Image (spheres, rainbow, N blue to C red):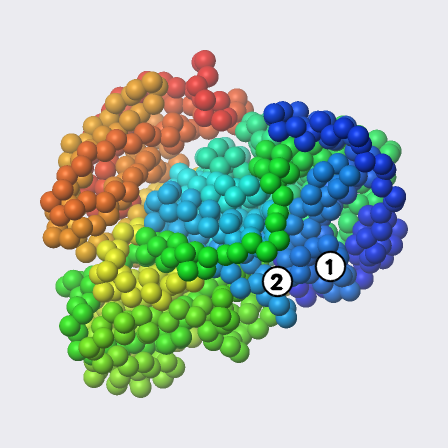
Amino acid sequence: MHHKYFAVAAARTALVAAIAAAFPLSASSAFAAPPEPAEPAQKPWLDRSLDADQRARLVVKAMTQQEKLRWVLGYFGHDFGKSKKHPDALPQSAGYIPGTPRLGLPALLETDAAQGVASQAGPAVRERTALPSGLATAASWDPKVAYAGGAMIGSEARASGFNVMLAGGVNLQREPRNGRNFEYAGEDPLLAGSMAGQAIKGVESNRIISTLKHFVLNDQETGRNELDARIDKAALRMSDLLAMELALEQSDAGSVMCAYNRLNGPYSCESAWLLNDVLKRDWGFRGFVMSDWGATHSTVAAANNGLDQQSGHEFDKSPYFGGALEEAVKTGAVPQARLDDMVTRIVRTMFAKGVVDNPLKAGATIDFAANGAVSRQTAEEGMVLLKNEGRILPLAKTVRSIAVIGGHADVGVLSGGGSSQVYPVGGLAVKGLLPATWPGPVVYYPSSPLRAIRAQAPNAKVVFDDGRDPARAARVAAEADVAVVFATQWIGEANDAQSLALPDRQDELVSSVAGANARTVVVLETGGPVTMPWLARVPAVLEAWYPGTSGGEAIANVLFGAVNPSGHLPATFPASEQQLPRPKLDGDPKNPELQFAVDYHEGAAVGYKWFDLKGHKPLFPFGHGLSYTTFAYSGLAGQVKDGRLHVRFKVTNTGNVAGKDVPQVYASPLSVKWEAPKRLAAWTKLSLQPGETREVEVAVEPRVLAMFDEKSRTWRRPQGKIKLVLAEDAAGTGATSVTVDLPASTLDARGRPRAR
């Protein structure tokens, strides 16, 4: 979600209340409803032998106008300013849409978000299992891991009484300082779309609805409600929209959440090109479009241009889809057929996803131990070993003394802030941190890395220093065989990082410790890329991201080699802000209502593509990730089968321990120009024993090898040669290559073959 800055939104409450008095469907009307008509004798839409489309048409035909209107207006699930939550909403929840009981249709009860069952702050927060950040899941490069995590949090959502989970963030990382990058899946459309798509599919396996969000280019928090994201349409189709298209195809997400920002002029939630032309026409989306909380700005334009449901209307200036929509339909400003379509899309999704046929049951139990294991395994798969000079890692269990420094590592691990905040079982590990209110509180999960390290090295002397005094920390480190410094970066919704540098003098801390102990390991708990001015002085760096409920145990398992790290970066780590398309963050964080535009002049050249295009050398390239073993590639070959390029190669574990590798295939055109020299075309993740060789085959997504033509709405690839590079990362580490000659191809907007 999604919440507007609370200070701004609270100022609008009086206006909402004044308008609401005139509209009988608004929140301040004591949720009054006209008398219900009689329950029908027959309910053919409850016949499970009919498909979802038939059932939806039948039930909408049986609805009164007032019943239809209730489906398109959502309420916040928590008190907000002078507005009280709907009495039937679950306490401290994201939202509520009343059902139609006489027709057998349950209400929609909504919870945030993609890391787990979140809770609004307050006196009775839900304590649930938290996955690692979305960026950590993406760093696993394993769609099965993403699906398992989605299935786990979806099960907790259902057990908690929710049938809608606002998961599925897939905004590309165009801005490394974005406060919500931790919720998303990195910078590449193929990787991000695949990983987010599987996570959504996992959520919906629990017979609940998930979302795809935030549609589209909601790529920074500074001025997110006011900025106009400007970009060439074809470039957008080949980048952010491609990621979302792939995610939608893999998941069949029930809902799409439109974003706060404008897109080339209109707001995303009233952009006819985005919602009607791209999503519903070109992609054939049959679900419904819900707004982000506070992202609706009109009645007629929003409804006619593709928005199907106004969410959490208390965050908007008006309940636009309440009385105002009723009046607009009466006057013909919004056709009756459009209202019927809005409602049909919503209830069709409810039938298609099993919400109607599998009602929620009170009192379901949650296996927190099993779910914590899923979270731990996700964290272990996603941790990225960035540096391991002299193979200082894994730490030997015979190590005599270890200094653990900083990052509240004595008690817990960090999480990201905002609407996705999951409150941990057992309460906050650290209390009193600021900000205490939105987008806080700052939450550390009670999974202590210090305790887990002691368990891994029971015979070692393990001491802790909080790291607040770099000089004192250096003295503690000097007396130990190994120093492990935990460095943190807290970011969250409505809270962009103003710099890629670690906050709170932590760069000074790391430098001081490294100066005192040559065997210093840095563990990063960050929401995205950070700069590392101390990198040359530190032999080992482990990126742990926000590692979730069981993060402390996962970190220790990787540090001591109980788990061989296999994560790879889903996003480039820049050497400095000066390498970015926008070295300075656009907008003024002190004036969030300032109107401004962000020119995405890089077009589709996002992340590593921008670095390739400009010849920048990053701190760490996209796809980078080390292991405690080594791998070698051979036998690379490409062949077109059934109109699709297939790539075969062999991977050998050339080291002494078992490990998992992520061989990556990049494509470069030799006869035409793309937006950048190369694109990620395919990858796989496989586990190999020492000395084992395995041959694998991967299929290349055809749209990755084409350019989008907006005029004809087609993907086009002329006949010509493509260079395929098999490598460990986007920088070409361990690369081998082959050239293939591909025939001409024209695909429609959904990537299906089309006659030329």
Q: Which residue is mark 1?
A: 85
The answer to whether residue 492 of the structure is visible from this angle is: no
The answer to whether residue 432 of the structure is visible from this angle is: yes
Q: Name the spot of residue 737 as percent of width and height, x first.
A: 20, 34
Q: Name the spot of residue 177 as percent of width and height, x first.
A: 46, 58
Would you place residue 7 above or below residue 175 in this image? below
Would you place residue 401 above or below residue 127 in this image? below
Q: Name the spot of residue 78 as percent of width and height, x first.
A: 69, 61
Compared across the picture, whether 611 is left or right of 663 comes to right
Q: Estimate the spatial distance between the alpha carbons at disc 2 and disc 1, rounded to whole Å.
A: 12 Å
Q: Check disc 2 and report its element: helix, strand or loop.
A: loop
Residue type highlighted by circle 2 = Gln
Q: Name the spot of residue 73 as percent of width and height, x first.
A: 74, 45
Q: Check disc 1 and report its element: helix, strand or loop.
A: loop
Please tell me how crowded label 1 is: few (under 14), some (14-19), or many (20+) other residues with Cα within 10 Å: many
Would you place residue 403 above or below residue 256 in this image? below
Compared across the picture, whether 334 is left or right of 524 comes to right
Q: Which residue is mark 2?
A: 120
Compared across the picture, whether 449 is left or right of 433 comes to left
Q: Residue at x 45, y 60 (%)?
A: 368
Considering depth in this image, is 94 or 715 the residue closer to the camera? 94
Asked where in the image residue 374 lies, by quadrant, the reply is: bottom left
Compared across the picture, whether 367 is left or right of 560 comes to right
Would you place residue 420 above or below residue 401 in this image? above
Q: Residue at x 19, y 56 (%)?
A: 628
Q: Residue at x 87, y 33 (%)?
A: 331
Please tell me how crowded label 2 is: few (under 14), some (14-19), or many (20+) other residues with Cα within 10 Å: many
Q: Residue at x 69, y 45 (%)?
A: 107
Residue type highlighted by circle 1 = Lys
- Residue 223 circle label: none
Considering depth in this image, is 267 or 649 the residue closer to the camera? 649
